[in-house]
Amino acid sequence: MTDDEILKLFYETDVLKTGHFLLTSGRHSNKYLQCAQLLQYPKATEQVVKKLAENVKDLGIQTVIGPAMGGIIVSYEMARQLDARAIFTERGEDGKMALRRGFTIKPGEKVLVVEDVVTTGGSVKEVISVVKELKGDIAAVAALVDRSGGKVDFGVPAYYALNLEVESYLPEECPLCKENIPIEKPGSRKKQQ
Ligand SMILES: [Zn+2]
């Protein structure tokens, strides 16, 4: 898939929307990204993950790991394509990212860390430390979307199906507000004025 084909698929599956949005940060934007929209379509997910798998298929990956929730389906589909094992980390009540449910990694095991969207890279870095603690060998990171503008460094090669910088504005500087375009709060169905 080319970058344009991925963009087209993201718009078709409502992963990416254009309009006037109120982000959780309080800032306004003309774009909104929700990867869960893609992951509800297994065939579309397969296509996007395939683009990522091309980059890592010769690395001898034994285990794919991602953080819950966003990383679980990406990990599973990637492992299916690489004929590897799929596991995930999750946060406990203490807020700490960990392997639970009896999941483990053997010392020296070749591991690929996956995620749906990388913004600050925080969750991926937490997964990396979980793997390092168990002496796993991290070969690379792969995520559906890089929103960081290439700014995040994981210390290993990182691959993305799409690089996407979403512009956002302070409410008082928002050009869409100046045009009186109704604002939408993603996740709710109501349009706000
Ligand atoms: Zn606005």
Image: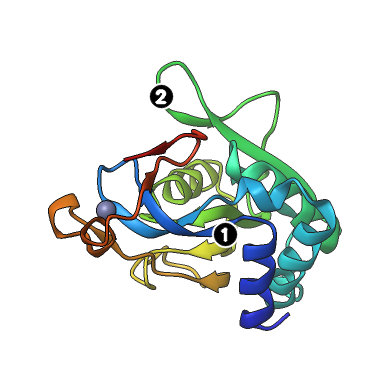
Q: Is mark 2 within 8 Å of ligand 1?
A: no
| Residue in front for this viewpoint, 128 or 146 | 146
Position of residue 169 relative to residue 165, above or below, is: above
Query: Does residue 49 appear left or right of residue 21 in this picture?
Result: right
Q: Quadrant of residue 81?
A: bottom right
Which quadrant would residue 111 be assigned to in this image? bottom right
The circle on residue 138 is: 1
Instruction: Give the label, 2 or 1, closer to the camera.
Output: 2
Residue positioned 73% across, 69% down in the render: 53
Q: Residues within 10 Å of mark 2 (few under 14, many from 20)?
A: few
Residue type at numbered disc 2: Gly
Q: Position of residue 83 (x, y in %)?
A: 86, 58
Dot 2: what SS? loop
Q: Residue at x 56, y 72 (%)?
A: 162
Q: Amino acid at mark 1?
A: Ile
* Residue 137 in picture, x, y percent from top left: 59, 58
The disc label shown at residue 95, or none: 2
The mark found on residue 150 in the picture is none
Image point (66%, 73%), residue name: 8
Q: Kindly indicate the quadrant of the structure image that contains residue 94.
A: top left
Element under disc 1: strand
Circle nearer the N terminus (2, 1): 2
Front in this rendered view, residue 141 or 40: 40
Task: Mark 1: give few (<14), some (14-19) or many (20+) Cα within 10 Å.
Answer: many
Return the residue nearer the eye: 7 or 72.
7
Quadrant occupied by the C terminus: top left
**Residue found at the very far left of the displayed protein:** 172
Between 106 and 40, the one nearer to me in the picture: 40
With respect to residue 97, does 72 lie above or below?
below
* Ligand 1 closer than 8 Å to label 1 CB: no
Q: Are marks 2 and 1 in contact (CB under 8 Å)?
A: no
Residue at position x 72%, y 66% from top? 48
